[in-house]
Each structure stands twice: as structure tokens, then as C-alpha cells.
Amino acid sequence: MPAYDYVCEDCGTRFEIRASMSAYSQGLKPKCPECGSLNTARKFGAVNVLTRSSGGSSSSGSCGHSGFT
């Protein structure tokens, strides 16, 4: 289940909720856990992307090919 980051527009509290994509697409509007306000907005943060490094020659691909021809 995805996590969504929100901030309360009234008190400034930042919080995270876990909800299904269908709940979010139907207009999910969570309450602030601090003050109970419904005046909340979704915030987008940085996304971490993990990559796999071969650690070897740059001509060796991860699929076993020995480079471009």
C-alpha cells in the first residue's frame, strides 16, 4: 500500500498516511493527526531510486551481452 505525505494547512504538521491507490483516486482527504483539521494538502517529496552497478567493465551489460556491435 503506498504512503502519501501530507501537511496541515492550519497548523503546519507534516504526516504520512498509507492508503490504497483507489482510496486516493476517490478523493482521500485525511484529518491532521495534531489538530484534526481537514485542511490538508498532499506534498511531493524526493524519490529514492536504487540502481545496480555491475562493478566491472562498462561494456558488459547485465543481460550478458558483451557490448554494442
Image (spheres, grey):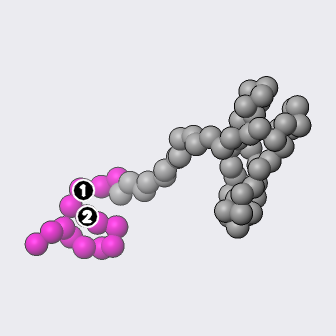
- Residue 14 seen in this snapshot: no
The quarter holding residue 18 reads bottom right
Q: Is residue 68 magenta?
A: yes
Q: Which residues are magenta?
A: 55-69
The residues tagged by marks 2 and 1 sit, at their Cα atoms, a distance apart of: 6 Å
The residue positioned 68% from the left and 49% from the top of the image is 4
Q: Amino acid at mark 1?
A: Ser
Horizontal side of 4 relative to 38 (left or right) equals left
Q: Residue 8: where, in percent of width, then height?
A: 75, 34
* SS of the residue under disc 2: loop
Disc ID at residue 60:
2
Among all residues in the image, which is located at the extreme top? 11
Task: Check disc 1 and report the residue beneath it.
Answer: 57
Marks 2 & 1, CB-CB < 8 Å contact:
yes
Res 2 → quadrant: bottom right
Place of residue 7 in the rendered image (x, y in percent of width and height, measured from the top left): 71, 35
Q: Residue flagged by tag 2: what amino acid is it?
A: Ser
Say which residue appears at 66% left-offset and 44% top-offset: 42
Badge 2 crowding class, 10 Å Cα cut-off, few under 14, some 14 to 19, many 20 or more, is: some
Place of residue 65 in the rendered image (x, y in percent of width and height, measured from the top left): 25, 73
**Label 1 Cα neighbours within 10 Å, binned few <14 / some 14-19 / many ≥20:** few
63 or 17: nearer the eye?
A: 17
- In the rendered structure, the answer to whether residue 24 lies left or right of residue 46 reads right
Give SS at disc 1. loop
Q: Nearer the viewer, residue 43 or 57?
A: 43
User: Does residue 24 belong to the magenta stretch?
Assistant: no
Instruction: Indicate left or right for 42 with 53 as reference.
Output: right
